[in-house]
Image (cartoon, rainbow, N blue to C red):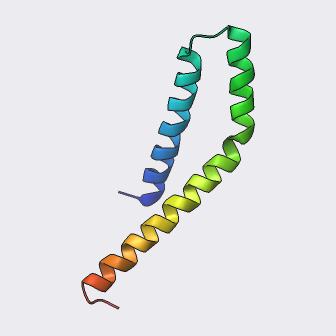
Amino acid sequence: MNSTKIIFGILGGVAVGAIAGILLAPEKGSKARKRIIGEGNNLPEDVKWKAEELYENLMQDAKELVSNNGVK
């Protein structure tokens, strides 16, 4: 499976979960809409941070896998 598809799948799941959590929370509709808009403003930076973190973790795992198998 392509790692890009995995990353987008994870990020999409996070976004859908966050929106579902906000919409299902017991508060007034106007408050929920303001909260969604506020969260949406932070979304690009959050996605970038998560993608960078995921990339770093994947690279570290790959390095460990290569070093454990004696491949250089």
Rendered-image quadrant of the N terminus: bottom left
Q: Residue at x 57, y 10 (%)?
A: 26
Q: Position of residue 24 (x, y in %)?
A: 53, 15
Q: Nearer the viewer, residue 12 or 46?
A: 46
Rendered-image quadrant of the C terminus: bottom left
Relative side of 72 to 15, left or right: left
Which residue occupies the extreme top position in the image? Answer: 28
Q: Position of residue 6 (x, y in %)?
A: 43, 52
Q: Residue at x 56, y 36 (%)?
A: 15
Q: Position of residue 46 (x, y in %)?
A: 64, 47
Depicted 64 relative to depicted 31: above or below: below
Relative side of 70 to 20, left or right: left
Which residue occupies the extreme left position in the image? Answer: 69
Q: Nearer the viewer, residue 1 or 33?
A: 33
Relative side of 32 to 26, left or right: right
Q: Residue at x 26, y 90 (%)?
A: 70
